Image (spheres, grey):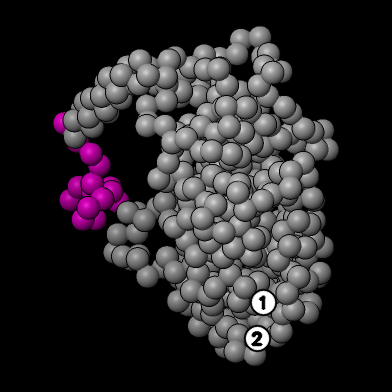
Amino acid sequence: MVEQSPEKACVGGSIPSQTTTSSLMKKKKLRIIFKLIIAFFFFIFFGKIKKNKKNLILSHKINIFNFKKKYKVYEILNGRVYTNNVDHCAYISDNLIISGPSYQYFRSKNQKIDKNEVLKFGTPRILKKVNGRLFSLLSGGAAKNNYGHWFWDVLPKIYLIKKFYNISKKDFFLVPSLKYAYQKETLNYLNISKYQLISAENYKHLSAEKLICTSHVSNHHPEKIPSWNLNYIRKTFLKKKFFFPKKYGKFIYLDRDEFKYLNKNCLIRYKDFRTLINEDEVKKFLLIKGFHIIKPQELDFFKQINLFYNSKIIISVSGAGLTNIFFCKKKTNILEISPENFGNEFLFISQKLNLRHKRIKLKTLFKSSLIQNGLMFLKIDKLDKILKNIRC
């Protein structure tokens, strides 16, 4: 009998045929051609965007303010911003792209300004004009839909802006998204009303009398979040008094809620997930040990803060839910379960905040197309041994 590969052995997991691959390539080429045609018509209206070859600052159009040398706030008079709201954003003055605050992500890294798509495709969107000041909080990457990046990439830009500006109710803010409750809750808590907010999911090309933007608040390295960033988030949101939530206890396991989607008869189809394939077994064990299973995504923002602030042991697979360790007390125990190639951002945050952070790095069952992801198996006896050595 000829053995089938895991991909061919499970329904829906077959390898694309050469015909399918060829078809996909043709569609990709057609999309690029269509994009170029659209770009041509918008070139007529807005002109071609050029790189500032000598990296000159148009002194009559741009003011730059410095914070701690590494971080800058740019004020552009009658400037434009264009974004695809995923991995590209261009700040433009006199049809020259400004390299400092603009970004162009590829494979999770910010590339050189030459790679910014406006240099090739221009700004092919209808322009929305804003009267007055427009503060841009765009950050790229996962900032529009990831809880963690919202806190360490987006909100700290407000801190930088407030260093040089007094914000009024007449000002507007360009944000990556307003889809999620935590985005609206946090901005409202910062006294920014819904009438001041413009979502880049609705408007991707804007101009303003004064366009204010900043450099990236962690220089495009989430594993190197600066101390001022952490301190700002903690001081801002820990002003409220938080009381111990008896309902949840002080030992919690964060349920990312991905396990329910797995079909154990065809695991390779889920190789890009980041979850434990024996999560049910892990949760049963932890319940016996006195842990509470929590789905933080089902709690409002301040209930999540309360939960983390009052917990003694927090166990979770690596992910956005761990962002709330921002709000833990010193010496809280964090046990992070992660694929072996996952980054060190949460460990780095814990070290800054004096938390007791341990990591269980696990080999993934299959190679994921995303290096930070993968299916994992955690042995219960290994978990038990680690828990016995944790001090509360």
Q: Is residue 28 above or below residue 136?
A: above
Q: How many neighbours does mark 2 have within 10 angstroms: few (below 14), some (14-19), or many (20 or more)?
A: few
Q: Is residue 103 above or below residue 154?
A: above
Residue at 54%, 67% (x, y): give it. 378
- Magenta stretch prevailing secondary structure: loop
Residue at 76%, 56% (x, y): give it. 232
CA–CA distance in space, label 1 to label 2: 7 Å
Left or right, residue 148 beside residue 37: right
Part of the protein shown in magenta: 1-19
Residue at 66%, 60% (x, y): give it. 190
Residue at 47%, 55% (x, y): give it. 178
Q: Does residue 16 belong to the magenta stretch?
A: yes
Badge 1 vs badge 2, beta-carbon distance below 8 Å: yes
Which residue was labeled with disc 2? 245
Tag of residue 306 = 1
The numbered mark, 1 or 2, whose residue comes first in the sequence reads: 2
Label 1 sits on a secondary structure element that is: helix
Q: Does residue 241 belong to the magenta stretch?
A: no
Q: Position of residue 169 (x, y in %)?
A: 62, 53
Q: Nearer the viewer, residue 210 or 300?
A: 210
Specify the quadrant of the image occupied by residue 34. top left
Q: Position of residue 54 (x, y in %)?
A: 66, 9
Q: Nearer the viewer, residue 84 or 8?
A: 84
Q: Nearer the viewer, residue 131 or 307?
A: 131
Three-letter amino acid code of the residue under disc 1: Asn
Would you say residue 21 is visible in this rendering?
A: no
Three-letter amino acid code of the residue under disc 2: Pro
Q: Nearer the viewer, residue 139 or 268?
A: 139
